[in-house]
Image: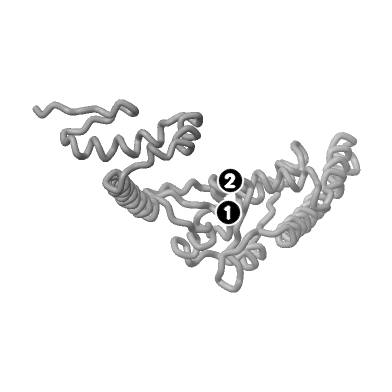
Amino acid sequence: MNSKDCCNYCGKGYTRKTSLQRHVLLCEIVHKTKREKICDQEETTDIPSRQQLYQIIQELAIKYHTQQQQIEEMQKWIQIKKRKMNLIEWLETNHPQSLPFQIWMKTIQVQEKHIDLLMAETIVQTITCILRDNLQPEKGKPFAAFSQKANTIYIFDESQQWQTFFSENYLLLIKQIHSRILRELCEWRNKHLKEIAENEKISEIYNKTVMKLMGLNFNQDSTALSKIRTNLYQYVKIEIKQTVELDFS
């Protein structure tokens, strides 16, 4: 095994003396204190010879070449391991076809069981349940969401493209569901007119249910609407597992 000579400044070992000498010339400059550098500037007798300058340039050239190779390797790794991709592009590549949001919205069904739920629970729980019941796999899903992009929902629209689910479309959806609930509640009332008239408890339940429904605030900053949207996001979101790292935007 070859013995190594080491640099007194950084401890790096070299098997060849010429390589060590070339390294020491540069390392000495790097490791000198501020005071030593000032003194060197004042003492012209310590200016390196042409041979020493040539050796320093050689050492710098070797270091530069090594660093360039390392940078090029890192860039190759980055290009392989990380590439930018926004989620709409991912959807268009992996799910180019789905049920358009506008068509799906016309098929939403509200049933008597949802009226029963509204009587027992909140409007938020009721609308969330209606959304889930109408988003079963066999019916198709016009929505997409990802755990990598919190609280952002995408819809597949009539133009056969994925787009962000903006508040205008969301309010349209909630109003559509609200209208269907109201229609189903009216049908429930017509079927139970006698009980409502004769039974005080049933009459009270019905009146409270009407108040729950009509009390829904359609403002964009509504707490109820925000909770429903969050519940929808949680229901439809998936996690993309890739062998590459994606920059989600």
Image location of residue 239, percent across then percent down: 49, 46
Residue occupying the far left of the picture: 1
Image location of residue 161, percent across then percent down: 56, 69
Image location of residue 220, percent across then percent down: 80, 52
* Front residue of 77 and 165: 77
Residue depicted at 71% across the width and 62% down the height: 169
Looking at the image, residue 34 sits to the left or right of residue 21; the answer is: right
- Picture quarter containing residue 47? top left
User: In the rendered image, which residue does mark 2 sit on?
Assistant: 235
Residue depicted at 46% across the width and 49% down the height: 240
Looking at the image, residue 9 sits to the left or right of residue 96; the answer is: left
* Front residue of 163 and 103: 163
Residue depicted at 77% across the width and 40% down the height: 119
Could you tell me how many numbered marks the image carries? 2
When the figure is inspected, residue 178 is found, relative to residue 201, above or below; the finding is below
Element carrying mark 1: loop
Q: Residues within 10 Å of mark 1 (few under 14, many from 20)?
A: some
Q: Report the amino acid beneath label 2.
A: Tyr
Image location of residue 200, percent across then percent down: 90, 36
- Visible in this render: residue 116? no
Q: Are marks 2 and 1 in contact (CB under 8 Å)?
A: yes
* Front residue of 111 and 80: 80
- Picture quarter containing residue 121? top right
* Front residue of 103 and 72: 72
Mark toward the start of the polypeptide (2 vs 1): 1
User: In the rendered image, which residue does mark 1 sit on?
Assistant: 135
Residue depicted at 58% across the width and 57% down the height: 143
Q: Report the amino acid beneath label 1.
A: Leu
